[in-house]
Image (cartoon, rainbow, N blue to C red):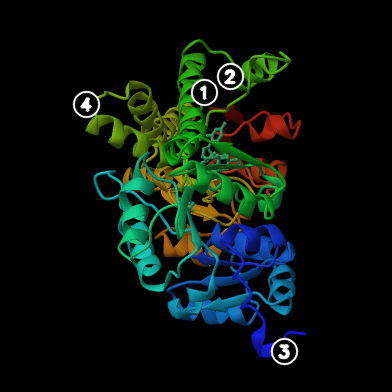
């Protein structure tokens, strides 16, 4: 009978075997509105998760169970921490990860060109911490070619070889802030730089989300995300231009859209507004436009949509002037109540918010602007250089810019000479109020 020390050393399970067995570790780089929900989702799927972020103060807050991310409640974070989720600001803690997922910002620079500095920094971290037999997935929205251009060189710089001891893929994040759908419920597109990378990445993600859609390579996955959000930007721009035409024709665009939406096929309603905010729709199409121009292709739809959407704050301010003029008042000196600075309803996020542009233009034209947004909060309103109010005063005009459910629009309308509703908010609530003018 062989003694213990004669036993053959057990072969180390391959990455694929570790993933198949369900006993593997995911390392998430970047714990924002994409990374933190992913790390929590992994933990609740029984996968060991290590969340890494550069910001030590932010990490300390997360370690105490304090979640600033709307889609991760305090309770969810605390439950994940109790189940073993590790949060760290030490990249060295990532060396044990079988899968490294990069969920870092991909903003645009001052001239709306891609700012790849965060992705490059995360890739440099991967080079430093990666061990052999690891899967690397980039989730940050970016131009087609980024995974090949930045992530592959990062892993080869660590001395690793694709399909031998490292696998690389792209999988676009599809988090919709404030939406009911959670990370695990949203289908995940996955494209590897090789067929093996696609297969292994699809296996890993299938343990994290309900449905995985593998595609033939990373560029397809990168472009999928850009198509999704360019589709939105272009259709929102069309709604914005339709609204301008409807105004010239003295037709209620909101009634037109609701009527068109009765068509049970071939039509998805998009709605006009004071402009397009958030960190996805105004920005993502520009990654595609930038890459297209590199290939000497003119992305006309993307450019036209951007022109229309970027003009909406000015158009909205002009309409406010027109409405005040109808009362014999001018913008200069008018008391204006701005309702909502968040970029979309019922969330506390004012990034790229068009509401801020509208209110700044009106302020620049001499209006006395006060802002009511109880979701974003007075502190944030004032941090944007605007005066906050509880909307209990009387106003020459109230402008609905973001349609938070919390607004008591009938009460506000009773204290304004006129309301300019850029969101069809009164119609949505079935409120028939005489002094409301729509976009
Ligand atoms: N907007 C309009 N009219 C519309 C729709 C939106 O003016 O018909 C404006 C909104 O007010 C906002 C901006 O456009 O200022 C963006 O709105 P959004 O509904 O697209 O919300 P986002 O920016 O949070 O987009 C995210 C995206 N998710 C990802 O990129 C993973 C987007 O793909 C989702 O479709 C969207 O959430 C969603 O449906 O909630």
Label 3, secondary structure: give it.
Answer: loop
Instruction: Report crowding for label 3: few under 14, some 14 to 19, many 20 or more residues within 10 A (C-alpha).
Output: few
**Alpha carbon of mark 4 to alpha carbon of mark 2: how far?**
37 Å
Provide the secondary structure element on which disc 1 rests: helix
Q: Nearer the viewer, residue 342 or 386?
A: 342
Give the label on residue 253, or none.
2
Instruction: Name which of mark 3 and mark 2 comes first in the sequence.
Output: 3
Crowd band around label 4 with a 10 angstrom C-alpha radius: few (<14), some (14–19), many (20+): few
The answer for how far apart the CA atoms under marks 1 and 3 are is: 77 Å
Q: Single out the mark in the foreground, 4 or 3.
A: 3
Query: What residue is shown with label 1?
Result: 239
| Mark pair 4, 1: CA separation | 29 Å
Residue 323 in view = yes
Q: Nearer the viewer, mark 4 or mark 2?
A: 4
Q: Is residue 157 left or right of residue 378?
A: left
In the displayed structure, 224 sits above or below 121; it is above
| Label 1 CA crowd tier, 10 Å (few <14, some 14–19, many 20+) | many
Does any atom of ligand 1 lie closer than 8 Å to the CB of label 1?
Answer: yes
Q: Nearer the viewer, residue 107 or 158?
A: 158
Q: Which mark is residue 3?
A: 3
Residue 206 image position (x, y, % from top left): 67, 49
Q: Nearer the viewer, mark 2 or mark 1?
A: 1
Please state, as top left, top right, bottom left or bottom right, where the N terminus lies in the image: bottom right
């Amino acid at each position: 009978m062989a003694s213990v020390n004669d036993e053959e050393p057990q072969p180390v399970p391959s990455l694929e075997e570790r993933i198949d067995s369900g006993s593997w570790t995911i390392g998430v780089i970047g714990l924002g509105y994409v990374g933190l929900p992913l790390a929590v989702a992994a933990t609740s799927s029984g996968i060991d998760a290590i969340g890494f972020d550069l910001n030590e103060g932010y990490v300390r807050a997360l370690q105490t169970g304090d979640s600033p991310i709307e889609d991760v409640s305090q309770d969810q974070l605390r439950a994940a921490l109790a189940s073993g989720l590790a949060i760290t600001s030490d990249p060295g803690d990532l060396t044990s990860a079988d899968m490294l997922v990069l969920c870092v910002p991909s903003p645009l620079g001052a001239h709306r060109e891609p700012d790849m500095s965060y992705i490059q920094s995360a890739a440099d971290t991967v080079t430093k911490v990666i061990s052999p037999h690891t899967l690397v997935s980039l989730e940050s929205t970016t131009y087609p070619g980024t995974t090949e251009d930045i992530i592959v060189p990062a892993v080869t710089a660590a001395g690793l070889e694709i399909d031998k001891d490292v696998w690389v893929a792209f999988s676009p994040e599809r988090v919709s802030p404030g939406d009911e759908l959670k990370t695990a419920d949203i289908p995940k597109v996955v494209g590897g730089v090789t067929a093996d990378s696609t297969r292994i990445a699809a296996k890993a993600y299938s343990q994290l989300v309900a449905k995985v859609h593998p595609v033939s390579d990373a560029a397809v996955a990168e472009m999928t995300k850009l198509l999704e959000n360019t589709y939105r930007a272009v259709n929102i721009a069309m709604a914005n231009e339709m609204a301008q035409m409807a105004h010239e024709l003295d037709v209620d665009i909101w009634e037109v859209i609701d009527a068109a939406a009765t068509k049970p096929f071939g039509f998805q309603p998009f709605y006009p507004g004071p402009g397009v905010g958030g960190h996805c729709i105004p920005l993502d199409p520009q990654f595609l436009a930038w890459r297209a121009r590199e290939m000497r292709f003119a992305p006309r739809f993307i450019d036209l949509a951007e022109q229309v959407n970027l003009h909406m704050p000015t158009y909205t301010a002009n309409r406010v002037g027109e409405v005040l003029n109808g009362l014999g008042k001018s913008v200069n000196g008018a008391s204006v109540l701005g309702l909502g600075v968040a970029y979309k309803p019922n969330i506390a996020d004012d990034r790229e918010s068009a509401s801020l542009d509208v209110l700044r233009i009106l302020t620049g034209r001499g209006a006395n602007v006060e802002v009511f947004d109880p979701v974003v909060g007075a502190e944030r309103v004032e941090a944007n250089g605007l005066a906050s109010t509880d909307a209990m005063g009387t106003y020459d005009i109230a402008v609905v810019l973001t349609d938070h459910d919390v607004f008591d629009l009938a009460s506000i309308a009773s204290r304004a000479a006129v309301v300019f509703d850029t969101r069809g908010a009164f119609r949505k609530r079935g409120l028939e109020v005489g002094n409301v003018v729509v976009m």
